Image (cartoon, rainbow, N blue to C red):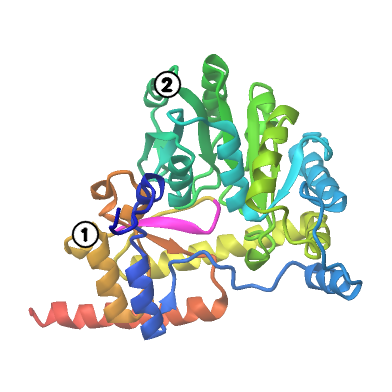
Amino acid sequence: MSGTPRPSARGSSLGEFRLAELMMEARRRRAIDMALGVPEHAPAPGAREAAMAAIEAEDHQYADPRGTQTLRRAVAEHASVWLGVEADPETEVTVTGGATEGLFSALYALIDPGDEVIVFEPFYENHVSTIRLAGGVPRFVRMRGRDWAFDPAELEAAFGPRTRAVLVSSPSNPTGKVFTREEMEQVGALCERWNAICVSDEIYEHIVFSGARHLSPIQLESLRPRSVVISGLSKTYRLSGWRLGHVIAPPELTAALRKVHAVVTGGAVGPLQSAGAVALRLGARYYEAMAADFEARHARTRAMMERAGFDVRPARGGFFFLADVSGFGLADDVAVCRFVLEESNVLVAPGSTFFADPADGRQFVRVCFGKGDATLDAAEAALGAMSSRWAVHASSGA
């Protein structure tokens, strides 16, 4: 039988990446990128030296698929020091090819086709895409208001007999929300009632400010035996290209996850794992300085965006915040992104990407404040010039 080969229904089910076309235009223009969360600071102290030493020592071959013992022990020590939780590096810790692969392997190991996974909305688009690829069905719980709070009754109503897991991201991409203890306990009580797993994306765990404190579900007694905690070295340690992540989970869940992980990657890159162990053992001074630096960058970015007409919903952690762009008077978020790109050569991300129904996000754009000084300087000047042109245009009565 002849014809055109078709992709799988699973692959076709994924939504369009609404930023992709804008990114192509931004690259052509060599635009100022305030959209993507790519770290622009130097890697964590000692990481490069440790990686180069491993390469010089001829460490070029496959590592243990579970992760090197050195890095697994460093992950366990990190959990003990910063979360007060003891994790067995032999049975509860797995090193993955970035947090993205950690989430992928976790969800494939945990859910069956048709199982429901509760997701807080606005969400990081890869979370929902991965759930769907694994055959799961996302159930959305909306967060609202300037502090992105959710309705406990709405959360409770989302749970049911087909609920297999709830996915928490704190600090969150794209909102910068940090879940409170009360909110996490509400999640824990419902997970206990419905025998559900709490999958927690904690890639920004040390980037918290404005009085917020990071709380992992694994720290709560009700969630410790049913938590899958995913993190990595991309953001906190500025090593996004090295693709080193890690997952902490109970032994039975870890065993299943490791089988999927071995099929997907065969193991994370070997010589870089020694560098990961060095980074994870950095002390409190490193994390405190980084959090203070990000708080200052958040304040600066918020101020420049508000001067340019964006109504910022402030973050309390992470790399991003959402800004309301209703005041621009344009059709939707994509139109605002195009306008800002054309008028200032600054790229921001359409907010509709982070909502199940794109119409619910058309009033928002996402802005990354985790940028280096040169990028912030350029963005501030460009947006300031754009605002000045608007002011002249408005005063002329045009």
Quarter of the view holding residue 328:
bottom left
Q: Secondary structure at mark 1?
A: loop
Residue 384 in the magenta stretch? The answer is: no
Q: Position of residue 391 (x, y in %)?
A: 21, 78
Furthest residue toward right = 57
Quadrant of the snapshot with the C terminus: bottom left
**Magenta region: which residues?**
317-324
At horizontal 7% and vertical 79% (from top left) the residue drawn is 397
Say whether residue 336 is left or right of residue 69.
Answer: left
Q: How many marks?
A: 2
Amino acid at dot 2:
Glu
Say whether residue 24 is left or right of residue 64.
Answer: left
Please identify the dominant SS of the magenta region.
Answer: strand
Say whether residue 136 is left or right of residue 87.
Answer: left
Dot 2: within a 10 Å radius of its alpha carbon, few (fewer than 14), some, or many (20 or more) residues?
some
Mark number displayed over residue 156: 2
